[in-house]
Image (spheres, coloured by chain):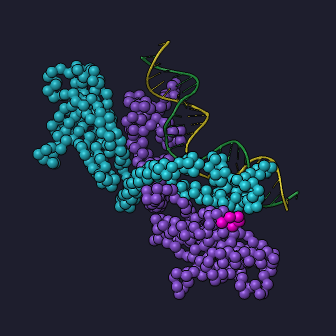
Chain colours: A purple, B cyan, C yellow, D green
Amino acid sequence: MQPEEEGESMLKIREFAEIAQVSLSALRYYDEIGLFKPASVDPTTGYRLYSIDQLVRLNRILALKELGLDLNQIVQLLDEGVSAEALQGMLRLRKARLQQQIEEEQAQLAQIEARLKYIEQEGRKLAHEVVLKEVYPLTVLRSWTGVSGFQANSHYARNVHDLLQQLRIKITGPTHYIYHQSAENEDTFLVELAIPVDTSTANHLPAPSRERLSLRELPGVSTMASTVYRGSPHAILEAYQALGTWAEVNGYQIVGPCRKVCLSWEGELQEYLTEIQYPVEKEP
Amino acid sequence: MQPEEEGESMLKIREFAEIAQVSLSALRYYDEIGLFKPASVDPTTGYRLYSIDQLVRLNRILALKELGLDLNQIVQLLDEGVSAEALQGMLRLRKARLQQQIEEEQAQLAQIEARLKYIEQEGRKLAHEVVLKEVYPLTVLRSWTGVSGFQANSHYARNVHDLLQQLRIKITGPTHYIYHQSAENEDTFLVELAIPVDTSTANHLPAPSRERLSLRELPGVSTMASTVYRGSPHAILEAYQALGTWAEVNGYQIVGPCRKVCLSWEGELQEYLTEIQYPVEKEP
DNA sequence: TTGCTCCTCACGTCACGTGAGGTGGC
DNA sequence: TTGCTCCTCACGTCACGTGAGGTGGC
């Protein structure tokens, strides 16, 4: 502004940095992106020279940074004459993001604490990892097995598979079992067998089979708590428990029937690969 | 492990990614860093082939990622046979970091809310930005002005400056005023003038001056709330207020006397540049 | 001449996302 | 031949931190 004033109290970058408590590289970077340029640059040496009253602007920058705005936003706020409303908008956006982030981090914290507690009590690492995922709708052939013993179910499932193969119906995914809680008795389950099939080939189904097998749409679930484990289906109880405590720790509610997905059932029982899924929803 | 099993149910990368709900690029990246490699790679096409039972490991990875561990830590945990204690250590570290981060974010949130409230009430952006910084110890010549009017102080300070110049004592920084609350009366202040000087030249001070000027160490302060503003010192009250509300919003307590630093006092009053500092501490 | 402060590249960060350009099987 | 899926680079992200290699003033 007033060139005749220059030189009277210009500060070299290190002096200015020390007063303002910022790093040299930060000042150089702000210069580079045009956020905060030195009052003048010595034409022969290239030295950046700052005047003390530039502190006002720099402090404004630092304060806005403290609020979590990024440098691009700050450039806009300071140089592009953004109105008070625009600042309001940025702050509201930042506030919303921050609130969500805090929530997530608190959930993470609870999870970590639960793990630590588990390790202290059991002296071991966790056996079953739980992940959240989305599952998509599937067209399946369904059937009620009416029985709940593992052996019987498994036998029944093999029979159905054989039948489908004979009928040249194309199987498109792993076999599901869905455990519906009985309306009368909480402790008994109605077990539904569901085999994903290719819709176009499923019409081969002859009438007598239709009595026991019917086509239905297995709905997708946006948040499914899932755990995959290898081993005998007898160990399934542990997986259920892991899912239960996981839901509790993370503040989720179980909102639908459990699904058991038989990812691999060849070879020894110990080699079986099974996924247990529970539809969940965040508690309000 | 069992090469004769290959090919029976290998999944291409997209199929596996869909089941596991991860992105293609994530899978390729995990492969690259050696965290999670496909069960096999087709030698002619280079296609990555995954077996369904790799889900167990991938889910373990995803679960650990959910806890906020980075991929390097996860590699160590899964592949370098780290003990339960090491996992404990990582989780404790993560927990501590997370707790601190949440605290900081909550402070940020409070600050944002205060700003938003301010804008709504005043319809304007904030005038005084407050930043936290550290100030270092200074060797100063001090004197009690004994008066509190701005004009008188300013006049007095100029006289002292002139004197120092005559005595060839080197001034090394901006003039400070320190406002000590009087022990008897809370509403009156004892004003201390403090001028940073070069220790080696300060010994020129003759005896008669020593009655009013004495050398002392102005202590450093690790957390100083500071606001810099340009303008007439009459507007100083606003700056005080800004600092006060800032301290309240952010949960800081004022733990020492206020300092006024005269960064620039040339030209018009409106051009003066002044910094107000308060030593603060986080409330417990 | 030796230090000191400053300068300008260039590269690394962390976990991928996003093209560009090319190949193999239907 | 046309699409589709896969591949491998290479670059960008965000706000700097950290050398490397060089210059100017005492």
Please tell me in which quadrant of the rendered image residue A268 appears.
bottom right
**Residue C7, x across and y down, in percent:** 52, 30
Give the vertical position of B274 relative to A4 (above or below): below
- Residue found at the very far left of the displayed protein: B184
Residue B134 placement, left or right of B11: left
Residue drawn 61% across and 59% down? B56
- Residue A36 x/y as whole percent: 47, 40
Q: Is residue B191 visible?
A: yes
Task: Tell which of A226 and A229 is nearer to you.
Answer: A229
Residue A219's quadrant in the figure? bottom right
Q: Give the residue at x 39% y 56%.
A: B106
C16, B85: nearer the viewer: B85
Tell me, yes or no, whether the highlighted magenta stretch contains residue B57: no
Q: Describe residue B125's horizontal placement relative to residue A236 as left or right.
A: left
Q: Residue at x 72, y 87 (%)?
A: A211
- Foreground residue, A38 or A97? A97
Residue B65 in the image, given as x and y percentages of width and height: 54, 55
Instruction: Read off the magenta span.
Output: A263-269
Can residue B108 be seen at all in this image of the molecule? no
Q: Quadrant of residue A229?
A: bottom right
Q: Is residue A215 rendered to the left or right of residue B218?
A: right
